[in-house]
Amino acid sequence: MSQRERSKKRRVKQWMAASMSLVMAGTLAFQAGPGKASADRGVVDLWKAIKPLTTIASAMNTGAHPDDEHSATLAYLSLGLGVDTYSVIANRGEGGQNEIGSELGNALGIIRTRELQEASKITNVTLANLSQKLDDPIYDFGFSKSPDETLEKWGEDVAYERLIRQIREKRPDVLIPAFLNEPSTHGHHRAINVLTVRAFKDAGNPQVFPEQLKEGLQPWQPKKLYVPGTEKAYDVSLPVNEYNELYGASYAQLGEESRYMHKSQGMGRQVDEGQGTAYYTLQASADGKKDEKRAASLFGGIAFTFDDLAKEIDAKGKDNKVAKQLNTLQKDANEVIAAYPAFAKVAREVHEMKADVQTAVELVKSSSLDSSAKNDLLHRLDVKERQLNKASQEATSVVVKVKPETGELIPGQTTKVTVTAFNGGDVNVGKVSLKLNVPEGWNAKASGAATFAKLDKNKTVQTEFEVTVPKQVEDFNPYALPLISADIGYEAFGTATTLHAVPDNAVAVLPPVALSLSPEAAVLNTLKPGDAVSVKVTATNYAPGAEKTKVSLKTPEGWTVEPAAQELSFAAKYETKTAEFTVKAPEGVKAGSYSLSAVSSDGALDSSRTVQVIQYPHIGKTYYVKPANLAIQAFDLKVPEGLKVGYVSSGFDNIDQVLRQVGINVTNLDAKTIQFGDLSQYDTIVLGIRAYAFRPELIPSNQRLLDYAKNGGNLVVQYHKPEDKWSPDLAPYPIKIGAPLIEWRVTDENSKVTMLAPDHPIFNTPNKITSADWENWIQDRSAYNPSEWGKEYTELISNGDPGEKEFTGTFLTAPYGKGNYTYSSIVWYREMPSLVPGSIRMFVNMISLKQEGTVSTGTTPQK
């Protein structure tokens, strides 16, 4: 190599390292979402595209929830080795917690799915989910301690069929479940281990789900099954701590870069250079052989390159022509790598390899190889063709985009979508074709030319399509493939390339007028059955222009609504208007659950849909379309008049809204009030879940809060994790949170609860709490229970999962000076917004506590 060449190579490496450093630094704070302007492009993206051409190996990592993936290992396999790498995740994480907002349930599942998709882009892996739609049976129903419970709720056959399907479609050489089947592990994690271990044996058995074979799938037997190991017990150690100059980071750091995308789960951590090793144990192999002791590869004895495949064919004495062509492909891949980072040279080599892949396909099809070997080779060649298309795009610097006029459509609407292709490189590109893909029943018509003879450097070709949505269309599914996409074809160096492109943000079909109800859930106090429920309906116009609608409420039989309906007129898209209604229950309404819905009618079509727009910088914009319903829970509830509560929200619960709804005067306290304000004006101060972690003013002001209680206030603290900056001395008498956290929670929402202090005011005033108040809870009982606490506390309940030791530190209260301090790890934040009567009645009692043996009547604590 000449001095000039060495100098050029050094400058390129320095540029790439600097560019990746910018990427790493920027990602720690706020990774951009779709449409991002990122430094991770150019020569780095070119390398990411061509590295996979050097290997034919594949691996699949299976997990239960978004963020379960082995990120460092995925980065090492995909970005480091070029292995065709897959991440298969069971559910959408709907039952998790949310550290960036108050969305829970399906809305949180949509967020976590988008985060997983963006994380997978960073590690360059192919993602699949077993859960396919909203309210899918494979649902995150909350923490589970049992794989049997998990598989029963998911539907074991459904989950297993979908996993076998993924393995047969993607045909991984190596399977890696993310977790072990151990008692201390989340039941969902254990379940995916159970399914993956079983699938390793069954995916290759044609008798298992034979209907899949009728669809064209073929049985597939992975070569090896690895499970997580430890530093002391492992068969393979992967050097994920290895630093890659091209990326300017280690694979562990790249893995953490992807984990930072899981912001709703607070994932991602700082990893220094040189840190980290991933350990795995070989649990099973197709040939029954063990790895060499303490190996450094998951692929020992597995064909890793085209040359390896050629040797296997030669050894069988099957088809010399195919073997030679595979050797040619290995030579092609080596030449692509050798041409790097010269874009035009890489492009030429890529297209030469594309031609040789096409030749290999024809040779395999006409060969004397058995059907199993043919299927295997054709699958690997198909993977290589897709990888070559991506490599061609990066090497030619062809940029493709799909740009809808709007991402928010309504049934029957006609809109415009533009598909563009730009040539930013030095390669002559010709025979360009632009095709728009729309769902069945839609119509897409090009308004101009969709084929072009050539595309010169720094030039753009584009086609505008007129797209019409049918009048009857299903609700938007945020988990489905994009509604609109494009296929872009072109030729270079005599061979064709096809690229696939999707819009930056979701394209959704929404109702012409979307209705949101405030509140979405309401309490009807049967002690005051004559009280009306005030319902505000906010209507948003998604039609492209003026629109009229009649808004009404559909109620249970016997209920009354005033007015019966309201006419609303809109002048333009996105305009919002409100309609207010007064709803009354019939006399003698009984305790129970009721539901009403808002309806929008244009005279021809009725719609009852709410559109929840979900938008964050790191995931872009998407939508949750759901029925426009209002749940009403009727039960008896006594609320002290004049009760004044200060709520310190972490932003992750809606308890304050529920309290306001039942008639309590709630003020959300800001940092200034907590630090310097007059706290004595509040009868009770409540700290939301994990507030110490997300309200930085709390720890420096903790003594002010304790003094507030000591001087007669009622201080209520909800659950925390140790990593939330919680320390035992934050409480007036020490409270230590149990560890490991996984063992200090109660997951059975129907588990028996014993009130240990039934005479305590929390169980008696103003509402009498009975065993019925512990019925009909949802998802779980408590999380992150204390393991140790001061003798000054009264243990209010004992509760545990069936067959396990019961916790007695779940609900603790103690007099402190003239006031009270209560710490509770009950999951109020789930129960109260879901209008579980007992949770609301008990919470009202808890915040009504004035002094031991008395209840607040709304008076102001005295200093």
Image (cartoon, rainbow, N blue to C red):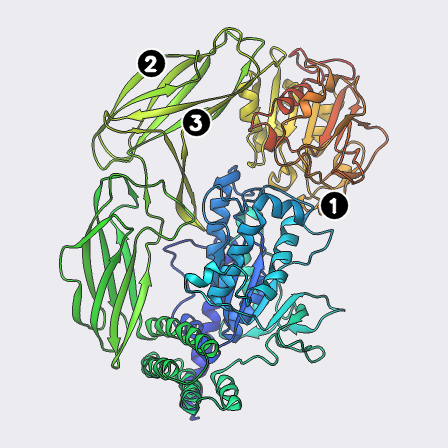
Give the structural element (helix, strand or loop) at label 1. Answer: helix
Front position in the image: 21 or 678 = 21
Q: Could you tell me how far apart the alpha carbons at marks 1 and 3 are, in whole angstroms?
A: 37 Å
User: Label 2 belongs to which residue?
Assistant: 564
User: Label 1 belongs to which residue?
Assistant: 743
The residue lying at 41 percent from left, 31 percent from top is 627
Give the structural element (helix, strand or loop) at label 3. Answer: strand
Q: Note whether 98 is above or below 70 in the view shown.
A: above
Of all residues, the one furthest to the right in this rendering is: 791
Image disc number at residue 844: none
Mark 2 or 3, nearer chain start: 2
Image disc number at residue 629: 3
On the rendered image, what quadrant is the N terminus found in? Answer: bottom left
Q: Note whether 290 is above or below 197 in the view shown.
A: below
Give the structural element (helix, strand or loop) at label 2. Answer: loop
Mark 1 or 3, nearer chain start: 3
Q: Is residue 185 left or right of residue 526?
A: right
Front position in the image: 601 or 531 = 601
Residue 9, image x and y in percent?
44, 83
